[in-house]
Image (tube, grey):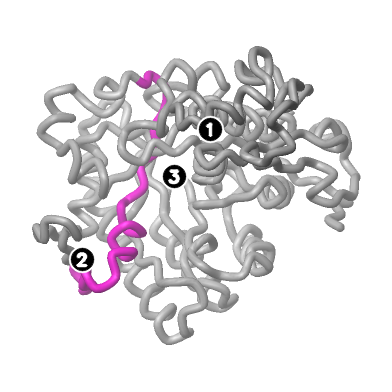
């Protein structure tokens, strides 16, 4: 049972070149310049006011020459609202044996072609500036979940060093941009309180437009999430945005919003949708945003269904009778199951839209 006697939901506005971001908010993931299977118009109608792209993937495909010719990522993908780009660090470190980290940056090889690349703090910032991002992330080192303290301490040291290099390069390069993007630092330290504290204090000394909490969705047991927030959030300035990276399940977002987090991203709604798992509103979902003191169990907020189960073969009810997304207003559970069973691409598209609608509406209620 989760209990909140005081809900510290923040509502701040983040001004960017491509519009104002009202928080708390959820960023659909457009890693390679597309939210998988969905059009930009659909994403906008669902209520998203910012999306997330990825430096590593966009650098490799389609490449900076293509995006430069299109005059930036916004024009290339047709999105007119803000874009946050991750630095690419997590993706590079995920390559395992295909990457080698030094104090200057990371050497890595593309797993398929073997082509070698070098990503430095300066290079990461340069790529993101060329993409035309509204919010740019510094390059950080993100060790696997539950790494030894020795490994994490070295990652914190390198993350701080790289953050300084990113800030110096950004300050020098972005000074002539008419409305410059925002630069966020990333706090690392895994589950260790002293290392999280050290990382946060080092980044605060450098000074950034916002602060992200990284390394909480890379393999640590989920029980550590609240602890990490307890360590870090009190250290952060109240007048700067706070971004929790890669999180998460609906109850984790609710808990984190109550702890004072502003921005979120996660693959869960769209990935689960593509595999036929859908989020359904439960009774206390409608309490969100209306009560300053409540207790709940996750299943009281929502439940999930796997649309491929035989029980839905003749179920002509909407997927969620309390949802007004296109799927729920137009089709039945039986029809959606049919789409998945015949392998038609409409099924994953509709399910992804529904799940994103659930996430965005949930956070909208918290914001209200």
> How many numbered marks have been drawn onto this rendered protein structure?
3
Judged by depth in the image, the label closer to the viewer, 2 or 3, is 2
Q: Are marks 1 and 3 in contact (CB under 8 Å)?
A: no
| Mark 1, residue position | 340
At mark 2, the secondary structure is strand
Distance, label 1 to label 2, CA atoms, is 44 Å
Is residue 264 visible in the rendered structure shown here? no
**Residue 256, x across and y down, in percent:** 67, 51
**Residue 42, x across and y down, in percent:** 48, 18
**Relative height, residue 256 to residue 38 (above, below):** below
In primary-sequence order, the first of circles 2 and 3 is 2
Residue 291, quarter of picture = top right
Q: Nearer the viewer, residue 99 or 127?
A: 99
**Residue at 27% from the left image edge and 31% from the top image edge:** 132
Distance, label 2 to label 3, CA atoms, is 23 Å
Q: Which mark is residue 105?
A: 2
Judged by depth in the image, the label closer to the viewer, 1 or 3, is 1
Residue 216, quarter of picture = bottom right
| Mark 3, residue position | 209
44 left or right of 178 in image:
right
**Residue at 21% from the left image edge and 66% from the top image edge:** 106
**Magenta segment:** 79-105
**Residue at 42% from the left image edge and 86% from the top image edge:** 150
In primary-sequence order, the first of circles 1 and 2 is 2
**Residue at 85% from the left image edge and 44% from the top image edge:** 300
Q: Which mark is residue 143?
A: none
At mark 3, the secondary structure is loop
**Residue 227, x across and y down, in percent:** 67, 68
In primary-sequence order, the first of circles 1 and 3 is 3
122 left or right of 295 in image:
left
Category of crowding for the residue at label 3, using alpha-carbon neighbours closer than 10 angstroms: few (below 14), some (14–19), many (at least 20): some
């Amino acid at each position: 049972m989760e209990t909140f006697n005081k809900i510290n939901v923040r509502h701040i506005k983040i001004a960017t070149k491509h519009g104002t971001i009202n928080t708390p908010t959820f960023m659909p993931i457009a890693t390679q310049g597309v939210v998988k299977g969905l059009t930009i118009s659909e994403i906008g109608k669902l209520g998203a006011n910012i999306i997330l792209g990825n430096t590593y993937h966009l650098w490799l495909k389609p490449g900076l020459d293509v995006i430069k010719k299109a005059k930036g990522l916004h024009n290339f993908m047709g999105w007119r609202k803000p874009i946050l780009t991750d630095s690419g660090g997590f993706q590079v470190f995920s390559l395992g044996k295909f990457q080698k980290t030094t104090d200057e940056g990371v050497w890595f090889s593309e797993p398929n072609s073997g082509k070698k690349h070098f990503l430095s703090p300066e290079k990461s910032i340069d790529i993101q500036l060329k993409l035309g991002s509204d919010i740019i992330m510094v390059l950080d080192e993100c060790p696997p979940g539950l790494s030894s303290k020795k490994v994490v301490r070295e990652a914190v040291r390198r993350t701080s060093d790289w953050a300084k290099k990113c800030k110096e390069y950004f300050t020098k390069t972005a000074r002539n941009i008419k409305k410059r993007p925002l630069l966020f630092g990333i706090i690392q330290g895994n589950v260790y309180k002293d290392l999280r504290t050290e990382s946060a204090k080092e980044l605060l000394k450098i000074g950034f437009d916002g602060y992200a909490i990284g390394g909480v969705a890379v393999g640590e047991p989920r029980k550590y999430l609240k602890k990490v927030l307890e360590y870090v959030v009190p250290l952060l300035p109240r007048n700067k945005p706070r971004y929790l990276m890669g999180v998460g399940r609906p109850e984790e977002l609710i808990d984190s919003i109550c702890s004072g987090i502003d921005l979120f991203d996660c693959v869960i709604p769209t990935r689960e949708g593509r595999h036929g798992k859908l989020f359904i509103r439960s009774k206390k979902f409608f309490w969100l945003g209306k009560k300053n003191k409540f207790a709940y169990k996750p299943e009281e907020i929502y439940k999930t269904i796997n649309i491929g189960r035989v029980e839905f073969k003749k179920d002509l009810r909407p997927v969620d009778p309390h949802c007004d997304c296109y799927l729920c207003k137009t089709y039945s559970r039986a029809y959606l199951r049919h789409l998945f069973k015949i392998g038609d691409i409409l099924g994953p598209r509709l399910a992804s839209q529904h799940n994103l609608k659930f996430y965005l509406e949930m956070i909208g209620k918290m914001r209200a």
